[in-house]
Image (cartoon, helix red, strand yellow):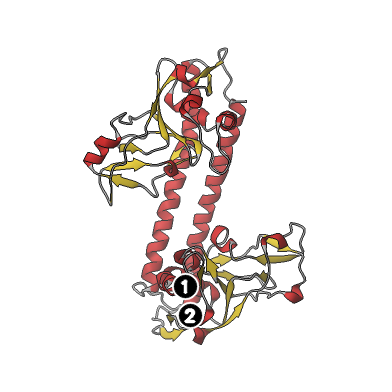
Amino acid sequence: MIFLETKSKYCPIKQLCQVIDCEHKTAPYVDSSNYLVVRTSNVRNGVLVLDDIKYTTQEGFLEWTQRAVPEYGDVLFTREAPAGESCLVPKNLNLCIGQRMVLLRANKELINSNFLSFYLTSEKCKREIYKYSIGSTVKRINIEDILKIKIFCPSITEQEKIARFLGAVDARLTKLRRKHELLQTYKRGVMQKIFSQQIRFKQDDSSSFPDWQKKKLEDVASFLKGKGLSKDDLSKSGYLKCIRYAELYTIYDEVIYEVVSSTSLDPDNLVLSLENDVIIPSSGETAIDIAKASCVNVSGVALGGDLNILRTQMNGNFLSYYLNHHKKIEIARIAQGNTVVHLYSSQLKNINIEVPIHKEQEKIVNFLIKINRKIEAISRQIEQTELFKKGLLQKMFV
C-alpha cells in the first residue's frame, strides 16, 4: 500500500484544470475515417471503449474541435447519460469530443493527469459527483458544479507514485482485455469455418467423417413451450432451479451447466427441462437479440414462459452453437413484430440445417468448450483484477 509522504489537501477542480465545454454544432458522421467521435457511451469505468465508435470527415473534425483539440493526457468527463464517467485521452488518435462532455486539461505543476483520471473513478469522488448531479431518470451535472468538485491533492511526487502503481494494474487489465478480445475473435472465426464445413474433424482412426445430412429443425427436435415464471416468482431461498427468457440475454451463453435463479413455485404447474434441451426466447426487444440459443445441461430446471424448447436426440450443445453462429441471421429474419418481437415454433421448425453424425458433433463441441473455458478463465481474471483495483482506490482515497 502507498502511504502519503506529505500533508494532503482537497482543491476544487477549477484550481487544478482548465475545464473546456465541448458543446458544438452537429457535424456529419461517416462510415470510416481517421477522425473518431467519442460519445458519452464510449467512456466507461476509466476506460475509452471503442466498440461502437462513430467517425467524421476532416471538415467535421474541424467543426467539432473548434473549442479544443483533445491532447494526450487530457481527461474526458461526461456530463450526462451517464454523468461523471471519465478517462484519459490516449496517444495517436484524432479525437472529436461529442456533446454532453467536457475536457479537463490539467495544470501540470499542480495535478498529474493520470492521477486525476484515477481519482475521478474512485468511490469517494463518485459520491461527490453524485451529490452535484441533478435529474431523476437521467442524471446530469452542470459545468458550474463540475468546477466545484474537490480533488484529493497530495504533492506531485506522491501523485506520480500513485499513478505509476495504479497504471501497472491498468496495464495488466489492458493485456487481459486484449487477450479476451483476440480469443473471442478466434472463436467466431473458427466457428464460421467449422459450420460452413471449411474445417472438418477426423475420426479416431484419422479417416473422414460422413457428409453432413440436410434436414429441417422439425426432423431433429420436438417443440415445447415454457410456462409461468415472472420476475416476482424468483426466490433466493427457492428449492427449484429456474430459467427466465430474459436471462438468456444477460447471463447465459451457448451452454448452461449452472443455473443461477430459483423459485418456490409448484413444479407440477411448470415445464421442467431434460438434460440436453435447447431453449430459444419466443419474445424480445429486437430480432437479432431474440436469435439466441442455449443448451440446458441440467435436468429438472423450470423453464419459464416466452421460451421455445427444442427437445432433441442430437447433441444439444452442438445444436446451440450451430444455431447461434450459423443460423442467427436467418432466425432473426423470421422473427415478427416491431415494439415486441416474437419467434414461434412453427417458424423455427422450417429452418434448414446440416447435421454431422453424433461422434463428429461431440468432437466439435469438445473443441469449442475448450475455447469457451479459456475465455471464461480470462473473464474471471479481468473481474478479479478490477476488484483489486477498486479496493486499492478505496484504500488510497478514504
- Residue at screen point 43% across, 49% down: 179
Residue 336 is marked as 1
How many marks do you count on the picture? 2
The percent position of residue 387, horizontal first and vertical second, equals 58, 40
- Residue at screen point 38% across, 84% down: 211
Residue position marked by numbered label 2 in the rendering: 347
Q: Amino acid at mark 2?
A: Gln
The percent position of residue 264, horizontal first and vertical second, equals 77, 65
Q: Quadrant of the C terminus?
A: top right
The percent position of residue 295, horizontal first and vertical second, equals 56, 70
- Residue at screen point 50% across, 67% down: 290
Instruction: Identify the mark nearer the N-term, 2 or 1.
Output: 1
SS state under label 2: helix
User: In the shown orientation, is residue 97 left or right of residue 261?
Assistant: left
Mark 2 touches mark 1? (CB < 8 Å): yes
Q: Nearer the viewer, mark 2 or mark 1?
A: 1
Residue 8: quarter of image: top right
Measured along the vertical axis of the image, is residue 281 above or below residue 376? below
Q: Nearer the viewer, residue 71 or 318?
A: 71
